[in-house]
Amino acid sequence: MKPMSRAMLLLALMLAAINLRPGITSLAPLIERIAEELSLSRGLISLSTALPVLCMGLLAPLAPRLAARFGLERTILACLGLIGGALLVRVGGHHSAILIGSSALVGIGIAVAGPLLSGFIKRHFVGHVGHVVGWYSFSMTLGGAAGAVLTVPATRLLSDDWAWGLAIWALPALLAFVLWLGVPNQRENAHEVAGGLPWREPRAWLITAFFAIQAGLFYALTTWLVARYHEGGLSLLHSNGLFSTFMLVGLVSAYILPWLAQRFDNRYQLLVICGLTSTLCLGMITFAPTVVPELWAVLMGFGLSGSFALSLVLPLYEVHTPLAVSRWTAMMLFAGYSMASSAPVLSGLGRDLAGNYQAPFMVLSVLALVMSWLAWRLRPRGESAAIGRA
């Protein structure tokens, strides 16, 4: 197979990244409607977003092993096929078992593809990590925003059937699958195949803890932010508009912040700023959701998407080889997403128990403050040495 140009490799990376979020975020604007039509509690319907996140955590350690056996690029190809097939199955999503089961399959595909795409960047874009991660996180955020913003209009165009509105997201996954058929597969070096996740590395745990909180916040907001705004006194149309703003603003920070981090060598300072910004915004959404809500939605999109984009960069600066990066990323995703998956469920249960969304959002605000503290702790003494080795 002929080698691909760098531009085509970047396009393949971006198309794959676009498909790592719509399967989850497309549920957010419809979740209250789905819960009512299927007669599901908030705690149970939240499994449609929590299960993918849990799978993304529990199965992430499989990614380096599958890449070692079948090749990194072919494993990503199979994941894109699985995601596309699972989303297509949502045509039958009026049965709750199919809806929740398809969510688990989406999570499996994302779980394996995520760590390997970081290794793909390390392999094909040496010397351009910050720039390419910017495009990678931008594409992932674009997919998430598209799922949140376009699902309702798509549903209306498709006879107002939300099952078809969810299934439409199979199309970009299948498009990415076709493009990845042309990506040359490379086998890993034999001496790299052996080896597990970096459980004994303190910095790996710090990175994982930070990632866990920011992911938990994101998926809790993806599931319940519209409901919190609506409960706070805003119309459903206004609430969906604010959620769309939150997602769309993330496109800017997802691209710009990794570039700034590499350009000015200030990734850890930016992480602290993102954490404190998220804390302030969550506090306002909790206690005063109708006070200039557009401002807090914009700043929340900047802070939370920025923290996600920057967390993706961190393993790339800790180790040297594509498979090693995949292992660090796999640990970050494994433990991080496993913990984060409880956030949407616990938030939904908190709402059921308290009778309102204010109580769980208070907890989310405290978690954002803890995330800020972890960002401050992440600043390494030997940062410049680590960057030089990368």
Image (cartoon, rainbow, N blue to C red):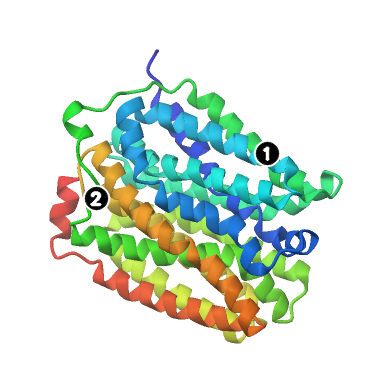
Q: Give me the disc on residue 243.
A: none
Which residue extends farthest front?
97
For image coordinates 43% across by 65% down, the residue present is 214
Q: Nearer the viewer, mark 2 or mark 1?
A: 1
State the residue in front, 332 or 307: 332
Identify the image quadrant of the C terminus: top left
* Secondary structure under the numbered disc 2 in the rendered image: helix
For image coordinates 84% across by 50% down, the residue present is 160
Q: Which amino acid does label 2 sit on?
A: Tyr
User: Which residue is denoted by mark 2 in the rendering?
Assistant: 317
Is 56 left, or right, of 105 in this rendering?
Answer: left
Image quadrant assignment for residue 28: bottom right
Image quadrant assignment for residue 287: bottom right
Give the Cα separation between the discs numbered 2 and 1: 39 Å
First-in-chain label (2 vs 1): 1
For image coordinates 52% across by 25% down, the residue present is 179
Is 138 left, or right, of 116 in this rendering?
Answer: right
Judge the density around disc 2: few (<14), some (14-19), many (≥20) Cα neighbours within 10 Å: some
Q: What residue type is labelled 1?
A: Val
User: Which residue is denoted by mark 1 in the rendering?
Assistant: 89
* Secondary structure under the numbered disc 1 in the rendered image: helix
State the residue in front, 366 or 276: 366
Is 208 left, or right, of 151 in this rendering?
Answer: left
Image quadrant assignment for residue 229: bottom right
Q: Is residue 340 visible?
A: yes
Judge the density around disc 1: few (<14), some (14-19), many (≥20) Cα neighbours within 10 Å: some
State the residue in front, 260 or 135: 135
Identify the image quadrant of the N terminus: top left
Q: Is residue 298 above or below residue 167?
A: below
* x, y percent for residue 238: 74, 70
Q: Is residue 281 above or below residue 81?
A: below
Q: In this view, does 69 lie above or below 157?
A: above
